[in-house]
Amino acid sequence: MYDPTVARLTYRALLGRRRALILSALPALLLVIAIAVRLLDAADDAVAVQLLSSFALATMVPIIGVIAGTGAIGPEIDDGSIVYLLSKPLKRPTIIVTKLFVAVAVTMAFSGLPILVAGFILVGGSQQIAAAFAIAAIVASIAYSALFLLLGTVTRHAVVFGLVYALLWEALFGSFVDGARTLSVQQWGLAVAERVVGDGVDVTSAVGLTTAAILLAVVTVAGTWYAGQRLKRLALTGEE
Amino acid sequence: MSTISISHVSRWYGNVVAVNDVTMDVGPGVTGLLGPNGAGKSTLIAMMGGFLAPSVGTVTLDGAQVWRNEQAYREIGIVPEREAMYDFLTGREFVVANAELHGLPDPGAAAARALATVEMEHAQDRRIDTYSKGMRQRVKMASALVHEPSVLLLDEPFNGMDPRQRMHLMELLRRMGAEGRTVLFSSHILEEVEQLAAHIEVIVAGRHAASGDFRRIRRLMTDRPHRYLVRSSNDRALAAALIADPSTAGIELDWNERALRIQAIDFERFTRELPRVAREHHIRLLTVSPSDESLESVFSYLVSA
């Protein structure tokens, strides 16, 4: 279910100069803000939670998920170079699963790690806030990658739809509308953070940990399966 | 030795029929798929390559269905028309990756062999995005050859190539055909196909219009009525003299254009007779222009024939 060559090609496409720059922009911003807050001596647990949940988890993680998830397959389908993967004795679900691994790894690296560092800059090891949000980001990375990889096989405008989902649904509706919260990857991540974080810290998720785990598994597995089906049915023709 | 069999294949997109009930066998040697742009050549090649399901009919390679059968790619090598490759790789990295994806035991050696076949060793360590069109085409070719397939499908491989590159690729394809591989390439240029393919399949407007060796196709294309627009110093006298000759089937005096519209049925004789007749009757020819020489009209004649 995993092909190292497909993975290598995907990594190199994702981490090419331009995309790597876009991927690093938000984590860099997060670190800059964390350092500024620390230098201004305004850092306490509440501020850290605020920054890590509303900016990092609600905005940065989904956007990085969009770039990595759709970028792992969308451009290849768009320009037709995927023909070089499809014209091989290679099961199409293997291509999808491999690309999912890569997208997850990239999303984790560009969101989990900076969040951990930013958390430590803000409050050190206090109440395990840094670790809690880093783990939440890692968990959310899995579902986001699967979701946006699927989107990359469904539409040519995957980035646009992905950003609309990430910014409107996750960041906006997710914060205000209750129903949307249950079906928000961000809340599933928060459910994990809620469990990890120390007692006195105000981190609450709209969903329980069990529900979150089930929903996350369902979205990841179903999304990946359907993306495999999409690729099986993908028709390629020339420019005619 | 492999044969691709296309049996009563049609393919439509919504209301548009791209390929219309085509049946043909493509066997070892070089076959040219000839047709004007938009005739359905790419759609047909996509179905042969397993990238598109026929709406009806079957496409098989040595008896096995091609669509949704990734094992078929052990025998098929594909050179797509589209330019996009993994441009951030070097030529060598790209061909090695293709060899690995085929699961070859020694990808490095296979890639080196393929790159040598297309004579690209000198540029193999440069990034693909620095390549010219011809170099790209050759690296695509190497990636298609890396697993030594028995079938090679090429969609418009000569598009945008300069004459030297064209000659080089033709030589390579000829060699592949002589080795007993089934080589099929598409083109909208008769001369290209004629120079290379022993066997030609003509596709026009989605239909299989003709099939045979290039002499037969050439004859079909020249043995049709040719239409000419002719202006002269004395149109009526010229018309009278020409209609007496068996090379013409009809002459119309087009009063608006102040010209003759001539239908010639013996193309060679007509081109010989026209200047001779004019000279004999002291008529000056002012304009002689073929009015239906576009390839499209040649093709549409073939379809209606």
Image (spheres, rainbow, N blue to C red):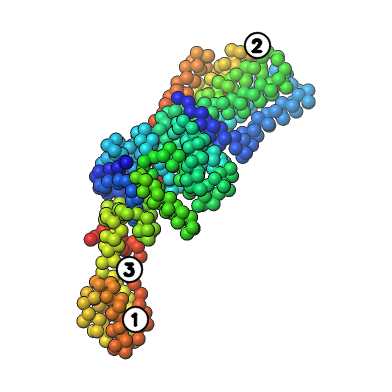
Q: Secondary structure at mark 2?
A: loop
Q: Is residue A214 above or below residue B16?
A: above
Q: Is residue B39 above or below residue B55?
A: below
Q: Residue at x 26, y 78 (%)?
A: B252
Q: Is residue B302 above or below residue B173?
A: below
Left or right of A223 in this view: B292: left
Left or right of B296 in this view: B241: left
Query: Which residue, given by chain and number where applicable, does mark 1 sit on?
Result: B231
Q: Secondary structure at mark 1?
A: strand
* Amino acid type of the residue that numbered disc 2 sits on in the rendered structure: Gly
Q: Chain of mark 2?
A: A
Give whichever of B249, B125 is nearer the camera: B125
Tag shown at residue A198: 2
The residues bearing labels 3 and 2 have C-alpha atoms spaced at a distance of 85 Å
Q: Is residue A207 above or below residue B244?
A: above
Quarter of the figure with the N terminus of chain B? top left
x then y, percent, for residue B13: 33, 45
The residues bearing labels 2 and 1 have C-alpha atoms spaced at a distance of 98 Å
Of badges 2 and 1, nearer the viewer stands 1
Query: Which residue, given by chain and number where applicable, does mark 3 sit on?
Result: B292
Whether residue A101 is visible, yes or no, is yes
* Amino acid type of the residue that numbered disc 1 sits on in the rendered structure: Arg
Query: Picture quarter containing residue A52?
Result: top right
Q: Residue furthest front?
A: B179
Q: Chain of mark 3?
A: B
